[in-house]
Amino acid sequence: MTEKQLTLQLDFHSGLPIYTQIVNQIQSQLVNGILKPGDQLPTVRALALELRVNFNTVARAYRILDEARIISTQQGRGTFITEIPPPEVSEKLRNESLLELTDRFIGEATRLGFSEREVSQMVRDRLKTRKEANVQEKDE
Amino acid sequence: MTEKQLTLQLDFHSGLPIYTQIVNQIQSQLVNGILKPGDQLPTVRALALELRVNFNTVARAYRILDEARIISTQQGRGTFITEIPPPEVSEKLRNESLLELTDRFIGEATRLGFSEREVSQMVRDRLKTRKEANVQEKDE
DNA sequence: CTCGTATTGTACTAATTGTATCATTGTGTG
DNA sequence: CACACAATGATACAATTAGTACAATACGAG
């Protein structure tokens, strides 16, 4: 597949900036396996046209994702989902980083009013969904 | 519809503060269906110009309406009548926001090279730790 | 291979929008 | 009159999005 449709749903009144919504949804689609490492994203201009948004807004979203090493933007080439880099960190650091990440996640969810049960349930749910998606893609 | 006229009648001698009149009339128009959820209101400056009033006065009215969750003001974007979704829709949105949050979390963890098992384990662990901490802090 | 051109992302700036803070005005009360 | 307080205005600021010019890359014509 050379071209990805990348269906994004923007809510212009949600309070979340457009660029944030783009960032979130791309990340989400990556987790769900809708987007995979190596996939080419639409050009900033193409996606902007489709979303009826200025291309700089898309560029901003891409830049954020790029800084997070989630995508790789290359001038004159395009934008691609990065291959998952093997994180070469010590076991200790590794654990600490997951702990921090997890605490931040739980903290944010709690702040949004979700109960621990809901958080726990959703994590189970999404991990399961993810696993199933990965099984299917073995066929390709 | 991209632009709303929003005809307001101010009485500068009524004794009622301008901002109160603006608040009242917008609320009234919302009740009467002249304004509908999702509608964009004029910018503070545009409405102020039309009403021959300082834009801070409009901003004050908007802020009051915002605090009452009647409108949603967004810096750099504009001001909109809040969607008042029925509870089940609200529940849906709530779930989607947790879903997105969770997906982002799992995505980051995975990108850092953590397995699903590790993620799952860490979430359980931190939730447990958290719960125990909460029991203690009941004393405060 | 070389060059021109289209395509793609980047950088910088401007425009639009709401926010925060303080000053001014007006009005009522002692 | 003097003071307090509420309403309004002035000014500077911050966030978001858009406009414009530019630079790197790809790619086909010659």
Image (cartoon, coloured by chain):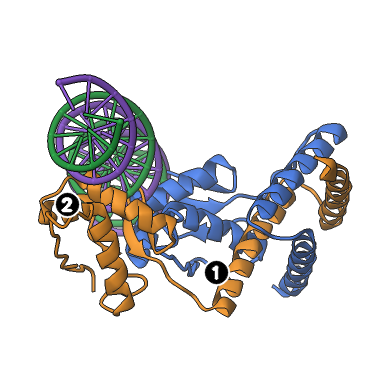
Chain colours: A blue, B orange, C green, D purple
Q: Secondary structure at mark 1?
A: loop
Q: Residue at x 52, y 79 (%)?
A: B86
Query: Mark 1 sits on what residue?
Result: A1
Q: Secondary structure at mark 2?
A: helix
Residue B111 or B26: which is nearer the viewer? Answer: B26
Amino acid under disc 2: Ala
User: Which image quarter: residue A109?
Assistant: bottom right
Q: Quadrant of the C terminus of chain A?
A: bottom right
Q: Quadrant of the N terminus of chain A?
A: bottom right
Does C26 sit above or below residue B102?
A: above
Measured in 3D between alpha carbons, the distance from the residue under mark 1 to the one under mark 2, in whole angstroms, is 53 Å
x and y, in percent, of residue C1 in the image: 37, 39
x and y, in percent, of residue B8 in the image: 17, 65
Residue A58 or D28: which is nearer the viewer? Answer: A58
Dot 2 crowding, Cα within 10 Å, few <14, some 14–19, many 20+: some
Dot 1 falls on which chain?
A
Dot 2 falls on which chain?
B
Residue C8 or A54: which is nearer the viewer? Answer: A54
Does A9 sit above or below residue B118?
A: below
Q: Which circle marks residue B48 in the picture?
A: 2
Q: Residue at x 68, y 58 (%)?
A: B102
